[in-house]
Each structure stands twice: as structure tokens, then as C-alpha cells.
Image (cartoon, rainbow, N blue to C red):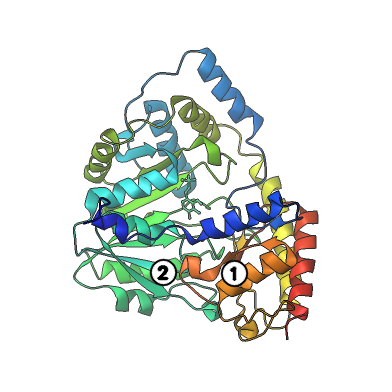
Amino acid sequence: MSFLSETLSRVKPSPTIAMTAKAAELKAAGRDVIGLSAGEPDFDTPQNIKDAAVAAIAAGKTKYTAPDGIPELKQAVCAKMKRDHGLEYTPAQVSVGTGGKQTLYNALMATLNPGDEVVIPAPYWVSYPDMVLLAGGTPVVVETALENKFKLTADQLEAAITPKTKWFIFNSPSNPTGAGYSRDELKALTGVLLRHPHVWVMTDDMYEHLAYDGFEFCTPAQVEPELYERTLTCNGVSKAYAMTGWRIGYAAGPEKLIAAMRKVQSQSTSNPCSVSQWAAVEALNGTQAFLAPNNETFKRRRDLVVSMLSEIEGISCPVPEGAFYVYPSIAGLIGKTTPAGKRIETDEDFAIALLEEADVAVVFGAAFGLSPNFRVSYATSDAALEEACRRIQAFCAALT
Ligand SMILES: Cc1ncc(COP(=O)(O)O)c(C=O)c1O
């Protein structure tokens, strides 16, 4: 019998790690690899947030805190929910964790029993299905279509729900597609949930602030107040505030669920870093002025990447509403052969050949549950993006 747990044997190691390791290996060998695989902004954390952290250290705010967050941060989350979405929460309905990832994980650990199903639209953020498996549940993956800009339809959600469904995980704007649901599109989904009172919605709003062309972000409990009692609204400071390394995420929802999540956290990691929590208070309460110029930059980069990739025969690249990713289809390139003689059967073959033969690192679609595609993160300089897209164009043009 294996010393390792059976639960762990059901969980896949991240397929992105293999690509990242390969890119690092080539870089170490002196190759000029351009990385378009990082899931984090290239901007620095704003100065006011750094200053708040320094002040917290100077004031000795360096001890254990309540396991799921300091009252000041919970209060800041309540104010943010009211300000941005018109949603009323009390601090007892808020949980703060070590990154958005921990709050999502806590919620699944706190609620799933063997046999419980969790509906996850694909392509999905890589961790959702494996977190469900770790928590003992069963992921029910529903593939979306490029023609529908990778958005789940009401009919698809309806068909995926069974008596065993416990959660529906919703992510808009999405990692990896950047797809953002309009109010009407979201309302169609919440309408389905209204007909199934046993299903809760876990909404991952991590990319809320990264949206372009006037896209109006909205979250399920806001568009359908009747779902308030069975919605967990998850968010964090990692992406919009360029704070990936600080590790602060949060969730707001029914008090009983939040208490259960606190129990999980209090017996695993205890409180998130005290200094980071004070930095997050400033992120949420302080100026939001840098968001607009950052978004201008991201939008410019999105447009550059979409237009350069769309020029390639065999690639189809919808324009996403937000986040900092695009998710082109390579359906038209499957079956072709690279200059080095490699046949492209899958999107993994494509991504590996692109890295080995053209020095561009992307993440293949199979990692996110929808193929044949690849994910480009455009959170890097305009010059690097332009050069990378030129290389992708040349690589694709040379396929036979
Ligand atoms: C959709 C989505 N949710 C959650 C997270 C986790 O964020 P954090 O770094 O705060 O744990 C990420 C990070 O990549 C993400 O893309």
C-alpha cells in the first residue's frame, strides 16, 4: 500500500509546472525565452500599500491575529462590498485567508462530502477541479464554446445540475479566457440557480477590477439578491493591486459557512501574515487611482496581442472583456508539422514546439480543461509582447 493518501492520488500535479520548468531550463542554457505564462501583473505594488506595511512593522503589528483576519480588514471588506456591489455584510460574514486560493479551498473543505458534485465551467482556473478532489468532492466539468466567447449558457448549467450538486463555481472575468459575463448573461445563470435551491454559488471575483471597453462587472448576489443566502463571494488583492506575493484573499457569505471556514483555517495555517493584512486594509480603503491607468495599459496590450494573433491562419482569438489573458484556438493548426519535424497532435505539442523552436513560453489549453487552445498572459511589456507575437506568427507560418 502506498504511504501517500488515496485522495492525493486523484489529484494531478500542475501541468503548467512542466512548461515552466522547461522554459527555465532553456533560459539557463542561454536561450532568449519570452515568458507569456505568468499569472501575475508585471506592475509593482503601489507605494501607499507598501508604506502601510512598513508602518505596520514599525508599530509592532507582527503578532498572531484572529485566525481569519483582523477586524480592520474585515471592516474594509464590508465597506468594499457595499461600495462596489451594494451588498451588506457584517465582519462575522467575512473570512480572510492566505490568498484567494486559501479561501476557496477552505470553503470546499468545509462543505464537501464524498459524492458531492461541483459544477465547473471549462476552461477553468487550474486549481478548481483539484481542490474539489482534495476536499473529497466530484468535479463536474462543463465545456464552453469559443463561439460563445467561452461563456456558460443557462441550458448548459441546467443540464449539469443533479440532486448531488452542492456548488457552482463561477469566475468572471475568467482565468484563462478573460471572458466577462454581462449582467444579462449572469442573470440567465442565476435564473437557473433560483430553480435549484440546493445549489450554492462560489463566485471567484479575483479579476473584478481588470475589465476593459466599459465592461460593467457584476457579481451573482448583486444581480440576484435572492441568492444572497447561498452565495460565497470570493475576491482578493493579488491581481488588481499587484500583490500576488503578499498572499491575502477574502470571502463574504453566510455566517455559518464563514464560521466553518474559520475552523478549517484555525486548524491549518491560522492567520494570514499580519503585515500583509495591514497592507490589504490600505489597498481596499486607500486610493484606487492607479487602477484606471493600469487598465489602459492592459487594454492596449490585449488589443496588440489579439490583433497580431488574429493575423495568423489557423488561429482564432476572441476579444476578451477582462483579466490579462487571451485563449486562442489552434484548431486550424492541428495535424501540421513544425520545421523541426514534429507533428502537432495536441495543444501540448504546440506549446512545447513553440517553446523549443521559437523561444516563447505559453500554457497549453489541456491544463485548463479545454482544447485545442493556449493561454497567453499579456501582463508583460509591450515590446516583449510584440516580439513574442512576431515569433508565434513566424512559427505558425513555417508549419507545413
Ligand atoms: C481565477 C483565480 N482565482 C484565484 C486565484 C488565486 O489568487 P491568490 O494568488 O490570491 O491565491 C487566481 C490566481 O491565479 C486566479 O487566477
The x and y percentages for residue 257 are 24, 46
> Disc 1 vs disc 2: which is toward the camera?
1
From the viewer's perspective, tell me whether residue 235 is left or right of residue 338.
Answer: left
Q: Amino acid at mark 1?
A: Phe
Q: Is residue 71 above or below residue 128?
A: above
Helix, strand or loop at label 2? It is strand
Residue drawn where x is 39% and y is 18% of the image: 63
Which quadrant is home to the C terminus? bottom right
Helix, strand or loop at label 1? It is strand
Q: Is residue 98 above or below residue 274?
A: below
Residue 374's label in the rendered image is 1
Q: Amino acid at mark 2?
A: Pro
The x and y percentages for residue 58 are 54, 13
Q: Quadrant of residue 268?
A: top left
Does label 2 point to a residue whose CB lies under 8 Å from ligand 1? no
From the viewer's perspective, tell me whether residue 207 is left or right of residue 353.
Answer: left
Residue drawn where x is 39% and y is 61% of the image: 12
Which quadrant is home to the N terminus? bottom left
Instruction: Give the residue furthest to the top.
Output: 59
Q: Which residue is mark 2?
A: 121
The x and y percentages for residue 195 are 25, 71
Q: Nearer the viewer, residue 178 or 223?
A: 178
The answer to whether residue 323 of the structure is visible from this angle is no
Q: Residues within 10 Å of mark 2 (few under 14, many from 20)?
A: many
